[in-house]
Amino acid sequence: MKIVLINGSPKNKSSSSEAALKDLQTCISKDTEIINYNFKKPFLIKEEVYQNRWAISIMKNWCAKTGFRWGQGVGIGCGGALASMSGLALGTGPKSSMGAAFKSLAANIHNKSQANDVYLSLNFPRFLYKLMAEFGWRQSIKKNGLKVRDLSRRL
């Protein structure tokens, strides 16, 4: 059996998409292959859960038009944090709700059954997520030879 996960985010080393796919692979049996296809123009924004609803509805429509049967979708918010949590075991800490969703998805894949789509965020306080994002911006800007005050500079 093959599963096609279509993801519109640009790929770079240690991306959040790669981390999510590795976590899903730990839940799925070895006879199942995961294929990650990348659109040339990204349309999936993973920062907020509600934005994933649009991407999943696009995929449902695509399945209907091509004759494929839709099984289940999992929309995950806080995608930017996934890559930094790749060493954390699925189902523990901030990834606890993600672990439950992936185990359910894996069971549905194995049984060839359908289920309602699941939308979740990492179990992580939003203010802390935003604080870490700001810290990441500051690190990136320094790494590129600029100063922190350049973040607020208008072009």
Image (cartoon, helix red, strand yellow):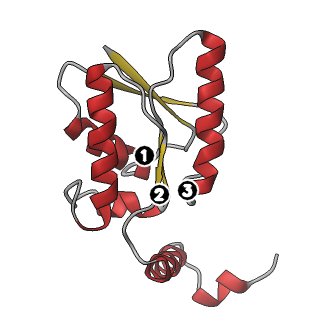
144, above or below 110, in the image: below
Residue 17, label in figure: 1
16, above or below 84, in the image: above
Q: Which residue is mark 3?
A: 49
- Amino acid beneath label 3: Val
Q: Nearer the viewer, residue 3 or 150?
A: 3
- Secondary structure under the numbered disc 3 in the rendered image: helix
Residue 79, label in figure: 2
Residue 40 in sight here: no
Q: Residues within 10 Å of mark 3 (few under 14, many from 20)?
A: many
38, above or below 10, in the image: above
- Secondary structure under the numbered disc 1 in the rendered image: helix
Q: How many marks?
A: 3
On the image, the x and y values in percent for residue 106 come to 28, 33
Residue that protrudes farthest toward the right in the picture = 155
In which quadrant of the rendered image does the C terminus lie?
A: bottom right
Q: Nearer the viewer, residue 154 or 46?
A: 46
Q: CA distance from mark 3 to mark 1?
A: 15 Å
On the image, the x and y values in percent for residue 97 come to 33, 57
CB under 8 Å between discs 2 and 3 = no
